[in-house]
Every structure is written in structure tokens, then in C-alpha cells.
């Protein structure tokens, strides 16, 4: 009887130790995942700051999965253009330091998909008559190549008005 009791005590002790070790491992995994999430969030914030400065942290900016940010300045009442649509728009382009690098003197016409992808994607999110500030990361702009006064790997701030389409 004594040996059965000792065996039971040993088995219960081993089971408790295994449970404790499993709980410890689960806590370690949760902690590691949280550290990874925080590091990824910090990397995203650092990238936004690098490309756009502190302006990127306006809570009214809507960020897409692609990295495009849209701050709607005036909401139009028209419909949104589709890929391939001919649009009339005007714009002002600045770098994060406020340097103006391009602007239209008058509204210009172009087809959605025949401009840098960040502008096309931004215009498709706007209704006719809207005005917005687009935060275009390099991968949706000119990427690793310089373009006129725009340095390579530059985030672009496009103040854009969708006149019609």
C-alpha cells in the first residue's frame, strides 16, 4: 500500500512539474510573439517617419496594406474612377522636408494606371470633386531611381484634386 502511495505521489509530482514547464513555455511563446509585434510596429513607424516625417502620424490618415496613406481634405460627391478611366486632376508634390518638386499649372488629363502606382491607387479611392493628401512611399512612387528633382527612395506627399473623369 505504501509503495502505491509513493508511486502516486511521484506521478502527481511529475505531472505537476510537466504542467508548470508547459505553462512556462506558453508564457515564453506569448512574450516572444508580443516582442515581434512591437518590433514590427516600431519598424513601420520608423519607415513612416523616414519617408514622411511627423506628418505621417495624423490619426485621420487611412493607410492601405500597400503603404499608401490618404488624408481626405475635401470629400467630393461624385463616384470613384475605375482602372483605365481617363481622369482630370491637379496636384502639388512635396518631399517630407516641404520642398516642392512638381505641380500642375492647370488640371491635367491622364489614364488611371498610366502614372506612378501610388497616384493611380489614391485617385481610385477618391470621389470626383475630392481633394486629398496622398502619402506615397518609394515603392509606389519612383523607387530606387531619382526622377528630376526627386531623390531616389523618396516618400512623396501629393496634394491632389480629382476634378472629373
Image: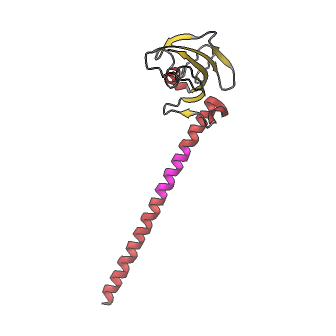
Given residues 85 and 95, the one toward you in this image is 85
Q: Residue 81 in the image: x percent, y percent?
A: 47, 20
* Relative horizontal placement of residue 161, taking residue 82 as reference (left or right): right
Q: Residue 15 in the image: x percent, y percent?
A: 38, 72
Residue 38 among those drawn in magenta: yes
Q: Residue 49 in the image: x percent, y percent?
A: 63, 34
Q: Residue at x 52, y 23 (%)?
A: 127
Q: Using the rendered view, name the quadrant where residue 90 is placed.
A: top right
Q: Is residue 80 above or below residue 110?
A: below
Q: Residue 88 in the image: x percent, y percent?
A: 54, 13
Q: Using the rendered view, name the quadrant where residue 146 is placed.
A: top right
Given residues 158 and 151, the one toward you in this image is 158
State the residue lying farthest toward the front. 77
Q: Is residue 150 above or below residue 16?
A: above
Query: How was this image coloured?
Result: secondary structure
* Stretch of the chain drawn in magenta: 28-39
Quarter of the image containing the N terminus? bottom left
Residue 107 among those drawn in magenta: no
Q: Residue at x 63, y 35 (%)?
A: 58
Number of callouts? 0
State the residue lying farthest toward the right. 98
- Principal secondary structure, stretch drawn in magenta: helix
Amino acid at each position: 500500500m505504501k509503495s502505491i502511495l509513493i508511486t502516486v505521489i511521484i506521478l502527481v509530482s511529475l505531472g505537476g512539474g510537466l504542467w508548470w514547464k508547459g505553462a512556462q513555455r506558453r508564457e515564453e511563446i506569448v512574450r516572444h510573439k508580443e516582442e515581434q509585434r512591437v518590433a514590427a510596429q516600431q519598424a513601420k513607424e520608423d519607415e513612416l517617419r523616414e519617408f514622411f516625417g511627423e506628418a505621417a502620424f495624423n490619426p485621420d490618415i487611412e493607410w492601405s496594406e500597400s503603404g499608401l496613406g490618404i488624408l481626405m481634405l475635401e470629400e467630393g460627391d461624385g463616384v470613384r474612377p475605375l482602372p483605365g478611366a481617363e481622369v482630370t486632376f491637379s496636384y502639388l508634390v512635396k518631399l517630407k522636408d516641404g520642398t516642392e518638386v512638381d505641380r500642375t499649372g492647370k488640371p491635367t488629363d491622364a489614364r488611371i494606371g498610366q502614372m506612378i502606382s501610388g497616384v493611380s491607387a489614391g485617385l481610385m479611392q477618391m470621389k470626383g470633386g475630392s481633394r486629398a493628401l496622398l502619402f506615397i512611399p518609394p515603392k509606389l512612387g519612383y523607387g530606387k531611381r531619382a526622377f528630376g528633382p526627386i531623390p531616389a527612395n523618396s516618400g512623396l506627399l501629393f496634394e491632389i484634386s480629382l476634378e472629373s473623369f
